[in-house]
Image (tube, grey):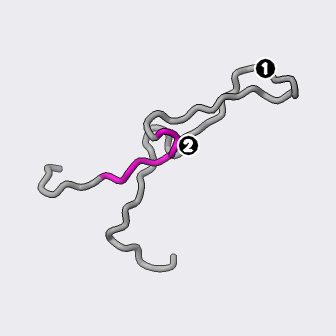
Amino acid sequence: MTGATPATTNTARICPNCDGFAAVAVTIGGRNTRGRLRTITAHCPACQGLGNLPARRVREGARA
């Protein structure tokens, strides 16, 4: 670790729906003419394929 992290750092949260694995390749069966598996790419709908969500903003005076 190179130093202390400032208290004002806005860090992104890992997406709880995909656990950070936002895009996956899914085989749809069969092979193409070159012999490779046919695949499609599926993206997480919650984070739009980014793997993280914006950090939550804490409101002052809000109930916990």
Q: Picture coordinates of residue 49 (x, y %)?
A: 52, 40
Q: In which quarter of the image is residue 47?
A: top left
> Residue visible at 40% across and 73% down?
5
Q: Which of 53 and 18 is in front in this view?
A: 53
Task: Inspect the image, locate mark 2, and give the three-letter code of the amino acid beneath it.
Answer: Phe
Query: According to the image, label 1 marks what residue?
Result: 30
Q: What residue type is labelled 1?
A: Gly
Query: Magenta includes 55?
Result: yes
Q: What element carries label 2?
A: loop
Residue at 42% across / 55% down in the picture? Answer: 12
Label 1 crowd bin: few (<14), some (14–19), many (20+), radius 10 Å = few
Q: Earlier in the sequence, mark 2 or mark 1?
A: 2
Left or right: where does residue 30 sit relative to residue 52? Answer: right
Residue 24, horizontal then vertical, whole percent: 61, 36
Q: Which residue is drawn at the image coordinates 51% and 79% (left, top)?
A: 2
Q: Give the range drawn in magenta.
A: 48-56
